[in-house]
Image (spheres, helix red, strand yellow):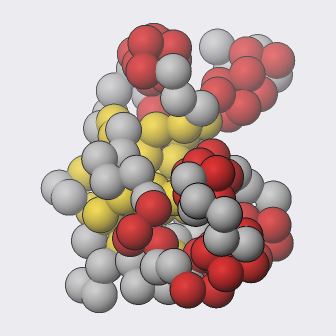
Amino acid sequence: MPSVRELMQSDVRTIADDALVSEAIVMLADGHVSALPVVNSTGQLVGVISSTDILAAEAESEGEALDNVVRHTRTAEIMTRVPKTIDPDEDIKLAAQEMLYLDVHRLLVVEDHRLLGIISQSDIVRAVASGLI
């Protein structure tokens, strides 16, 4: 069984915790992804912002226009603060089980507090379809 390191995506776009939500929306759309790891000024992983977080913030905006929320809100204000992570040397089966148990679509791959990549349900399905698993 392959390890997370073998299947993870290592070319990961991140966004700063002080970036505006409007910047996150552009990065999500341009990258065709549904979430971005959030890093602080020293590059440390501090959270993850997803399209779900953005939609929830808009829904909770109590009548504010979505445009107002995305132009004046920082990613740190609406991100998920405790992202789900996994070690790169873990078995891919454990990654799949964690995603199912935690009801998430991706895990951030972290080693020594450093972001190495992302493993998603799609990565696992792709490996199964191609016979790697």
Q: Residue 123 location, x and y as percent?
A: 67, 33
Q: In which quadrant of the rendered image does the C terminus lie?
A: top right
Left or right, 27 with respect to 16, comes to right
Which residue lies at the image location 73% right of the left edge and 16% below the top edge? 128
Q: Residue 84 location, x and y as percent?
A: 36, 38
**In the rendered image, which quarter is residue 106 located in?**
top right
Q: Is residue 2 visible?
A: no
**In the rendered image, which quarter is residue 126 located in?**
top right
In this view, 10 is above or below 40 = above
In this view, 66 is above or below 133 = below
Which residue lies at the image location 51% right of the left edge and 14% below the top edge? 100
Which residue lies at the image location 81% right of the left edge and 67% below the top edge? 29
Left or right, 71 with respect to 96, comes to right
Left or right, 112 with respect to 80, comes to left
Q: Residue 89 location, x and y as percent?
A: 32, 34
Q: Is residue 66 visible?
A: yes
**Between 22 and 1, which is closer to the camera in this rendering?**
22
Left or right, 121 with respect to 81, comes to right
In this view, 125 is above or below 73 = above
Q: Residue 85 location, x and y as percent?
A: 34, 40
**Between 130 and 49, which is closer to the camera in this rendering?**
49
Which residue lies at the image location 56% right of the left edge and 53% below the top edge? 60
